[in-house]
Image (spheres, rainbow, N blue to C red):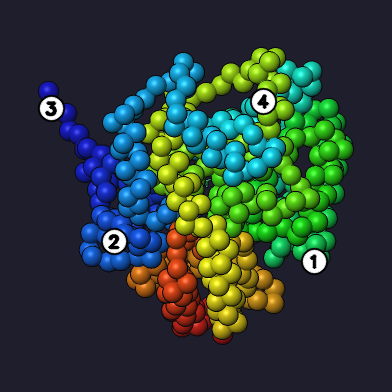
Amino acid sequence: MTVATVSSTQARPAIGGPQDLFNSTRNTIGLPTIVRGEDIYIFDDQGNRYLDAISGAMTAQLGQGNRRVLDAMHAQGMQHSFSYVRTTRHLPNMGLTERIARLAGPGFERVHLSSGGSEAVEMGIKFLRQYAYATGQKTRTRILSLMPSYHGGTLGTIGWTGDEDAAAVWGPMAHFSTKIPAPLSYRPPGGGTSREGALFSAARIEAAIEELGSENVLAFIVEPVGGQSTGANVPDPVFFTELRRICDRHGVYLVFDEVMSACRAGTFLAAHQIPDCKPDVVVTAKGLGAGYTPMGALLAPARMVDELAERTGFNLSHTYGANPISCAGACAVLDETVERDLLGNARCVGAHLRLRLEALKERHPVIGDVRGQGLLLAVEYVRDRESKEPFSAEVFASDRIRQIGLKEGVMLYSRRQNQGRYGEWSLIAPPLIITESQADELVDQLDRSVAEFTREMVRSGEIA
Ligand code: PMP
């Protein structure tokens, strides 16, 4: 018997092989195949060089090919490659958790390692739930978070992520948090000033807690500086002052999701820049492994961790948690960060970059806003500055600028949040090792890309 078959590769040829087939076809068009990296640049198989303006995924803080990190991982692997975190102790775990606790400062004496951002966020919430349960607060289960926001892609974290379009697919499966309008500085909820928007959000938080019954609310989770979902939104400081007051008043734990903002915002934790609002626990990831190794961490106070250890312990871990080779790599990442003062560089070059981006805004009417902190910045695009109206879905301005950027030699990352209802932007988040002249190079590339995009829009009659 002959059976006619069409293999999947015949049905849909994929340039990148099986890796391409999980992406939407539209998103794989024009993706460069990267074969080499050096400093803050990556090179494709056609010999093109790209300045990596988004550190891969806001991750590669040390750029490419850092010998110290790679040597540390190799040496650790030769010495002791793996043993399980629940049945053994090891020095790389000790070294990394001590470094993190020291950099994080008082209130974050205990550190639990995991394999990435989503896992760390889940660990943070599960730790608080286990602590609440063990200390007799058994009804505290409900989570509050912002709309929009991002907290991960697992079935747990999808529910806490603020994405208006997620409910249709995941609603029947994920457990959704109560969403509060995010205190966006450029598009404040309630329509007033940024400060009024922050007070509006805070009031909604308190109202939601009262409606749910504070005895049922476990935690509020927030990115102190926004990531992709808000384009590096920095809430007015009054938001955090109010948030701490509200959480204290209702016994709700406050979680800072610093998966993206740690180090990048210019201090080890962005929380260090908000003295009025110390979170109860912090989670971080991305830059901790700097792209060399998966790594995430939950930072918590000794008081809570030690009390829980006496009562029941926190009995959750994953196989790769505190992997020795990963810990050795992350120790070297932190040593490089401290010894080369990359936090200072994030503040310094970040300030320079921001000034130059603001100057770009003066010359390009399609740039509506420039915002962020340290080297976590964003440029928002609008069709009309007065009304802040975004470009249409067909234009997809941020992605068109990303494509033009590739020709100009800069790697950007586009986001049109919830079909443009919250606007669209390019995140500007280069490696923390970037120099001032490289920042100038980045701005010049973006300048030419936005100019070319503007010419296209004028030619097509989209703008005057
Ligand atoms: N939280 C925030 C704020 C993030 O930016 C991300 C990743 N973009 C995550 C959580 C999830 O991290 P990961 O992709 O490593 O699971």
The residue under label 1 is: 193
Instruction: Indicate which disc, 1 or 3, sits on the residue closer to the N terminus.
Output: 3
What SS does tag 1 mark? loop
Tell me: residue 459, above or below residue 405. below
Q: Quadrant of the C terminus?
A: bottom right
Q: Do the residues labelled 4 and 1 touch (CB within 8 Å)?
A: no
Residue 2 numbered tag: 3
In 3D space, how far apart are the residues under numbered discs 4 and 1 (Cα atoms)?
A: 40 Å
Name the disc covering residue 305, or none. Answer: 4
- The correct choice, above or below, for 458 with respect to 85 in the image is below
Q: Which residue is drawn at 40% across and 40% down?
A: 329
Residue receiving disc 2 = 43
For the N terminus, the image quarter is top left
Q: Which residue is drawn at 81% across and 56% down?
A: 238
| Point 84% across, 42% down: residue | 246
The amino acid sitting under disc 2 is Phe
Per the image, label 2 sits on a secondary structure element best described as strand
Vertical arrangement, residue 381 with respect to residue 24, above or below:
below
The quarter holding residue 134 reads top right
Judged by depth in the image, the label closer to the viewer, 4 or 3, is 4
Q: Nearer the viewer, residue 100 or 127?
A: 100
For the residue pair 387 and 247, the one nearer the viewer reads as 247
Q: What is the C-alpha distance between the residues marked 4 and 3?
A: 65 Å
Query: Callout 4 environment at 10 Å: few (<14), some (14 to 19), or many (20+)?
Result: many
- Outermost residue toward the left in this view: 1
Q: Nearer the viewer, residue 377 or 151?
A: 377
